[in-house]
Image (spheres, rainbow, N blue to C red):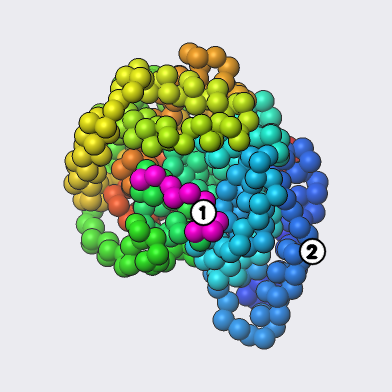
Amino acid sequence: MELWQMSATQLATGIRAREISAVEIAESCLGRVEDVNPKLNAFVDVRPEETLADARRADAAVAAREALGPLHGIPVSTKINTPQRSQLLTQGVSALANVTAGQDDASVAALRRAGSVFLGRSNAPAFSVRWFSTNDPHGRTLNPWNGAHTPGGSSGGAASSVAAGMTPLAQGNDIGGSLRYPAGCCGVVGVRPTVGRVSNWTAPEDAGPEGPLTFQAWAVQGPIARTVADARTALQAMAGPDLRDPFGVPALPQAAPRTGPVRVGVVRDVGIVTSHPSVDQGLDTAARWLADAGYEVEELELPLLAEAARLWSLLLFEDLRPMLPGMLEMADEALGVHLKYAYEFAAGLWGDKPGITAYIQGWARRATLITRLQEMLGTGMILLTPVSAEPPFEQDADIAGPERGRNLVAAQWPMTSLPVLGFPGVSVPAMVADGLPIGVQLVGGRFTEDLILDAAQAIEDRAPRLTPVVSP
């Protein structure tokens, strides 16, 4: 097996045993980048000399018998909307094509402390808004399974690169599925942590204008990986108290002791849109595997998630509304079309201009929904949902026409409901249908990432290995 095909866990074990070096791993991954990135365009900036310099420092630390972090010598990519010192911070926008970050944001700094070797910058749509990863300055990222379908967005470059074997780990962020949806599209694992578990702090000089409340309260940083074990290790490395983050948690609550099997509520349809047959088949497969692993699985109606998804279109879009003129002036034409159809979808729920009263009431209702879901899941129960109501969308489906654009927003209810509520979710592959991976999402109570990662591991243990995709 080539080094680029190995998991981060395997590579870390080899480094600690001095059986392989960080330089050898970096060279193998850079070779893979050279072979497949021209086809996929997952990375938009790769600096081999800087990567190899990181790797040499990692090997020197091993030779000096220094204490090693959990990701010591392991390659990882970072996203073009996330500050990494001295690296491009383009946001996928031509007007920002030459902007570089002054310092690491908190999640990148945590990866650096954990010993990671930085491999490249991953692609995303303009301002990381679409569920597709294409933009004017960097072009289109392809899904290594089928280039006619999206690799997901906004962390599409991250997921494509992990699935194709360019890197075992990638950093991304999520406010509407941007970690979980690309993972589902590419057949890898994506983790959206509980809000506050991983710091979302960025230096003011790199952050730009202060983000609205939804950005502050919903956006999270997290990992994409090929295996659940790798995702768990990367999440642990990224997590940590950071009181600069207004939603950071200074100390994680202790998990309540559990007795008996964990219950799994399968949520197929919340009344917004009917799922594609392949999506239902993926849920059936994952539910069967969880039952085989000893989980108590039952079908569940949960309209609460539909209400949360509707609130996403109210609260986020109203926060975006004052920013739209500046965004549309700088971004590509596709972003404007996507947002036009997305706002039409929201108008069907809330009217053309909902106003301040609806906005205030929406935030108040959100608090009630959080309490109700925590009361349900705080007992040790988890949810099993689709990643999306559809298999990976065809490229640019969101701008193909008004009806298709609106339908896409509806299909993403599993992605949009969770950020509103702040609960953790894991996307894990379950099967392949018509040549495309079908993922499922596991949702737990607040700060129960270990519980849902355990369930994701049970699914992975029974599923065929899908990645790396050797010949994209």
Image point 63% across, 85% down: which residue? 65
Q: Which is nearer the eye, 208 or 18?
A: 208
Task: Answer with mark 2 or mark 1, whichever residue precedes in sequence.
Answer: 2
Which mark is nearer the camera, 2 or 1?
A: 1
Q: Position of residue 147 (x, y in %)?
A: 69, 30
The magenta span reads 204-213
* Residue 260 in the image: above or below residue 411: below
Q: Secondary structure at mark 2?
A: helix
Is the residue 63 above or below the residue 98 in the image? below
Q: Which residue is mark 2?
A: 49
Residue 117 in picture, x, y percent from top left: 66, 65
In the image, is residue 41 part of the stretch drawn in magenta? no
What is the quadrant of residue 412 in the picture?
top left
Query: What residue is rendered at 56% in x and 43% in y?
Result: 155
**Which quarter shows the C terminus?**
top right
Secondary element at tag 1: helix
Residue designated by label 1: 207
Q: Dot 2 surroundings within 10 Å: few (below 14), some, or many (20 or more)? A: few
Q: Which label is found at residue 133?
A: none
